[in-house]
């Protein structure tokens, strides 16, 4: 299988970090964002991180897809915790029901 040709610079610039974040928060996966944007996987991840997107685990994505309202509530809750209360990644993960372990940190 041959790799896709890289997206043109103009097309690449049209896909903003914020637009990727909005699509991700509505339930799109990183793979789906790669397919729809024409950007590389790494570029999509970099732009999501640039937009300070709270990333989900695969089981959170599956759960959210089962219930669209749950997806919207979770995204809104995490956004509020982050933007209004300055929640850390560990706090956001705990609020979403997942813990994040960092090697070497107890």
Image: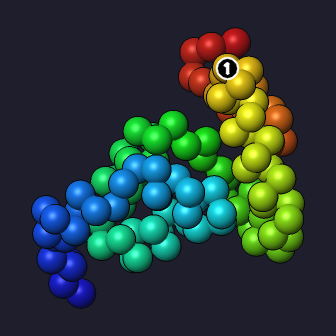
Is 62 placed left or right of 67 in the picture?
left
Between 24 and 100, the one lying in front of the other is 24
Out of 52 and 106, give the one closest to the viewer: 52
Residue 56 shows up from this direction: yes
Query: Residue at horizontal 46%, vertical 41%?
Result: 51
Query: Is 38 placed left or right of 25 in the picture?
Result: left
* Quadrant position of the C terminus in the picture: top right
Q: Which residue is mark 1?
A: 86
Residue extending farthest bottom:
1
Q: Quadrant of residue 53?
A: top right
Q: Position of residue 80 (x, y in %)?
A: 74, 34
- Measuring 78% from the left and 58% from the top, which residue is drawn there? 72
Question: In x, y percent, where is residue 28?
Answer: 58, 67
Q: How many marks?
A: 1
Asked which quadrant contains residue 91, the reply is: top right
For the N terminus, the quadrant is bottom left
Q: Residues within 10 Å of mark 1 (few under 14, many from 20)?
A: few
Depicted 8 relative to depicted 79: above or below: below
Q: Is residue 93 visible?
A: no
Residue 7 percent location from the top left of the image: 19, 70
């Amino acid at each position: 299988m041959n790799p896709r040709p890289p997206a043109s610079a103009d097309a690449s610039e049209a896909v903003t970090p914020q637009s990727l974040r909005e699509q991700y928060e509505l339930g799109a996966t990183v793979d789906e964002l790669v397919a729809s944007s024409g950007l590389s996987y790494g570029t999509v991840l970099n732009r999501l991180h640039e937009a300070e997107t709270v990333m989900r685990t695969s089981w959170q994505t599956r759960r959210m897809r089962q219930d669209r309202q749950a997806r919207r509530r979770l995204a809104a809750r995490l956004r509020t915790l982050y933007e209004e209360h300055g929640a850390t990644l560990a706090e956001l993960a705990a609020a979403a029901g997942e813990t994040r372990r960092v090697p070497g940190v107890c």
